[in-house]
């Protein structure tokens, strides 16, 4: 994937005598011209794959520092301290009102699912202050634990987003459809105070006030799903919801007024036969329907999804990581009424509904037309040096005149060319981060710019950019035998981007 990139140069001729510029400028005795470099593309020199690293590999000129690690002491609301949870996932930066360019709060979710008598069962979240000092972001003060006990507990806090109301919306990526799913891990059954069994109260989107460090509410109107991500539009009236399930569904919540989640209406997406548009199928808003919203959506004919992951909005369109799955059987879902998406109808299905989608893709959804299509297919690189596979976390960043979609892998397994032959023999997982220039028409994997290789065993997630272009990345579940600091989950800051 090595490419030669030119420099984009803008030549500005400056008159020496400072006189007005006419249609035909006068010649100057001074032949000196000022040359301004508007952009250097790409913003880094792409790196090669590496299938033997225990470190985080970055391009030349970039450095990382660890900000927060699993096991660091966090402070509860009552002042008690305890080792922080791990499996760092979502990152959200909440700018300070007084100095948004140099101060803010960083929110980190924990995709954990085990009992914890001190910090609470299941998932979690940690918040802490960041301040830019001497051109570098530094942690200020203590790490603070978010207490989810007012809503019972959460499970596997995965992706999410910062809502237009300034609060964080964290997704519960949990599969539990009976109490045994939770109790077999040692989590005790409990009464949530609404007459429903414990499992019916878990698997939703939870709103958190990061400034007050308090949970606001579990939004059951977004339905019980394997919630991966939620994107709330700027007007606060629509939530787009992804479902990391095989097969899953794509949903949205429409609200009559901004942030009126309690009175929202849930819908499931059904693609048109020709793939050029789609419709939204209404889901009943009673409790039983919300608990079983995927089942109802499929029975109504919703389009089946091959595990949706994170969503990013760029210029009014949504870019969704569809991570794919190896060797799946959709017969039961198709028999119940589900429909096969147009973008895989010809290439991935046989007459019995058998499917194989080892690499996944990035989808593009246009809310103005309801068209959903494949934007970038995963697969092998032309030089046979690995592949782009199973996209998960995504975000975007503008550098110079370009906007980039930033994609993190979370490979399904270490086979089928997703790692080197040697790494496959020893069952070692390696994931990478790529940048994609959004000005490229009909992009392929050959257009991807490899920015990072994660340490063995880890996926990268929670990728965001701070106001000055510094990059936050969570290193989740690295191999515990790695040298420190990548022997446990952690949050790192990457510096080196020169934004203009």
Image (tube, grey):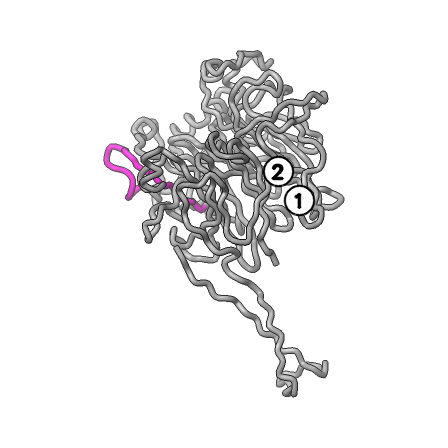
Residues in magenta, as a range: 345-364
Image spot of residue 67 (x, y percent): 62, 38
Q: Tag 2, which secondary structure?
A: strand
**Quadrant in which residue 473 is drawn:** top right
Q: Nearer the viewer, residue 64 or 294?
A: 64
- Within 10 Å of the Cα at label 1, are there few (<14), some (14-19), or many (20+) other Cα atoms? many
Q: Earlier in the sequence, mark 1 or mark 2?
A: 2
> Does the image show residue 214?
yes
**Residue 467 sits above or below residue 21 on the image:** above
For disc 2, the marked residue is 67
Image spot of residue 13 (x, y percent): 62, 78
At horizontal 53% and vertical 32% (from top left) the residue drawn is 489
Q: Nearer the viewer, residue 263 or 121?
A: 121
467 sits to left or right of 302: right
Q: Nearer the viewer, residue 170 or 499?
A: 499
**Residue 442 sits above or below residue 139 on the image:** below
Image spot of residue 147 (x, y percent): 64, 23
- Within 10 Å of the Cα at label 2, are there few (<14), some (14-19), or many (20+) other Cα atoms? some
Query: Is residue 360 covered in magenta?
Result: yes
**Residue 275 sits above or below residue 257 on the image:** below
CB under 8 Å between discs 1 and 2 = yes
Q: Quadrant of the C terminus?
A: bottom right
Residue furthest out toward the front: 483
At horizontal 55% and vertical 50% (from top left) the residue drawn is 62
Image spot of residue 123 (x, y percent): 55, 25
Q: CA distance from mark 1 to mark 2?
A: 9 Å
Q: Tag 1, which secondary structure?
A: strand
Residue furthest out toward the left: 351
137 sits to left or right of 155: right
For disc 1, the marked residue is 137
Q: Nearer the viewer, residue 191 or 388?
A: 388
């Amino acid at each position: 994937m090595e490419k030669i990139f030119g420099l984009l140069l803008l030549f500005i001729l400056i008159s020496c005598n400072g006189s007005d510029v006419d249609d035909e400028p006068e010649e100057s005795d001074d032949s000196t011209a000022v040359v301004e470099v508007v952009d250097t593309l790409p913003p880094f020199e792409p790196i090669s794959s590496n299938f033997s690293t225990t470190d985080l590999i970055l391009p030349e000129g970039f450095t990382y520092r660890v900000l927060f690690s699993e096991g660091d002491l966090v402070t509860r609301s009552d002042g008690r301290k305890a080792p922080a949870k791990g499996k760092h996932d979502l990152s959200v930066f909440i700018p300070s009102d007084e100095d948004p360019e140099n101060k803010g709060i960083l929110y980190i979710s924990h995709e954990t699912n085990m009992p914890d008598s001190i910090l609470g069962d299941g998932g979690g979240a940690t918040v802490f202050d960041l301040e830019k000092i001497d051109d570098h972001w530094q942690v200020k003060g203590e790490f603070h634990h978010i207490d989810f006990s007012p809503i019972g507990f959460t499970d596997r806090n995965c992706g999410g987003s910062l809502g237009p109301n300034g609060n964080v919306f964290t997704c519960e990526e949990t599969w539990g459809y009976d109490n045994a799913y939770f109790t077999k891990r040692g989590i005790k059954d409990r009464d949530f105070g609404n007459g429903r069994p414990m499992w019916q109260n878990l698997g939703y989107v939870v709103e958190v006030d990061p400034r007050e460090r308090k949970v606001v509410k579990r939004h059951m109107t977004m339905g019980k799903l394997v919630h991966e991500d939620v994107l709330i539009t700027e007007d606060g009236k629509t939530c787009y919801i992804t479902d990391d399930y095989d097969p899953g569904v794509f949903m949205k919540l429409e609200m009559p007024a901004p942030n009126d989640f309690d009175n929202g209406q849930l819908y499931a997406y059904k693609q048109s036969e020709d793939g050029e548009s789609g419709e939204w199928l209404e889901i009943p808003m009673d409790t039983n329907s919300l608990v079983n919203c995927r089942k109802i959506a499929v029975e109504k004919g919703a389009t089946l999804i091959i595990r949706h992951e994170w969503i990013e909005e760029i210029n009014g369109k949504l870019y969704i990581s569809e991570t794919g799955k190896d060797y799946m059987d959709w017969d039961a879902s198709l028999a119940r009424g589900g429909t096969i998406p147009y973008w895989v109808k010809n290439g991935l299905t046989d007459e019995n509904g058998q499917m194989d989608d080892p690499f996944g893709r990035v989808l593009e959804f246009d809310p103005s037309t309801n068209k959903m299509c494949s934007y970038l297919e995963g697969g092998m690189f032309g030089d046979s040096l690995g592949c782009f596979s199973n996209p998960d976390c995504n975000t975007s960043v503008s550098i110079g005149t370009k906007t980039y979609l930033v994609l993190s892998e979370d490979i399904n397994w270490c086979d089928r060319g997703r790692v080197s032959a040697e790494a496959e023999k020893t069952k070692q997982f390696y994931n990478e981060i790529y940048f994609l220039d959004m000005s490229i028409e009909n992009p392929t994997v050959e257009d991807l710019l490899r920015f990072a290789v994660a340490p063995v065993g880890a996926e990268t997630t929670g990728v965001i950019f701070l106001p000055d272009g510094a990059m936050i990345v969570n290193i989740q579940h690295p191999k515990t035998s790695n040298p420190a600091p990548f022997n446990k989950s952690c949050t790192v800051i990457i510096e080196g981007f020169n934004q203009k």
